[in-house]
Amino acid sequence: MSGKGFDVFERTLAGERCWVRTSNGTRQPLPTDRWLGVAGGADHRADTALICCCDGPTVDLGCGPGRLTAALLQRGVPALGVDVSPMAVAISRFRGAPALHRDLFGPLPGAGRWSYALLADGNIGIGGDPERILARTGDLLASDGIAIVEFDRPGTGSVTRQLRLESPSRIGSWFPWASVGIEHADRLAAATGFQVLTTAEVAGRYIAWLRRDDRAVRAVA
């Protein structure tokens, strides 16, 4: 996502109504309240499940406005958010959560030393290439680090589509995004040097905990 896509995303963070449209014409509202951490209820339970096991340095990839990074810091867990949206990073910092305005494929601090990495809110789909995202996550983790990945519901399959963001005042550019059902967690893990520890469904959201496996890393290298 770039250019006009960023403009629309930043408008939704500023409070404007926005939607995501697929190339086949379907449209649905963006879950802005969840991203901002004000949804409460079921989303709060799922967010708690995402970070409950994090007891060491954690990097939140595609952190958005930093709700998970902030929640970790409130528990005393060292955490850092990374996002390509300047406004998302500014909101994260405003709420006291450290965040970097960077591409997650560029240089990042602590590479190879993070205990945990978060790919929440479907961020396994960034760029339309789930294997590339998960392999990059493995590069950032320590040898026994854990990736906590939010997948789509069972039966979704693994599909890459062109999406664009829309608001009443602006239409963004098309960008690729992947939707990956939880049933693909084992395959993706094996292809990228991980093993699945466990999976869970919490309030209609699907989470997998993947441990980095040095033997598997050497096998796929």
Image: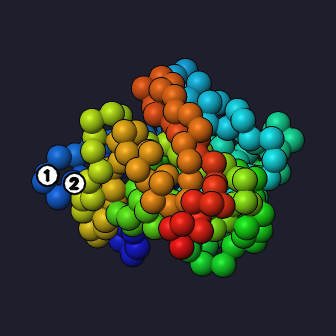
Whether residue 26 is visible: yes
Q: Secondary structure at mark 2?
A: strand
Front residue of 52/183: it is 183
- Badge 1 amino acid: Gly
Place of residue 153 in the rendered image (x, y in percent of width and height, measured from the top left): 35, 34
- Badge 2 amino acid: Thr
Front residue of 69/118: it is 118
The residue at 62%/60% (across/down) is: 215
Q: Are the two marked residues, 1 and 2, in contact with CB atoms closer than 8 angstroms?
A: yes
Whether residue 168 is visible: no
Disc 1 from disc 2: Cα separation? 5 Å
Which residue lies under the disc numbered 2?
22
160 lies left or right of 145: left
38 lies left or right of 27: right
Place of residue 15 in the rendered image (x, y in percent of width and height, measured from the top left): 47, 47
Place of residue 31 in the rendered image (x, y in percent of width and height, measured from the top left): 42, 40
Residue lying farthest to the right in this orientation = 76
Which residue lies under the disc numbered 1?
25
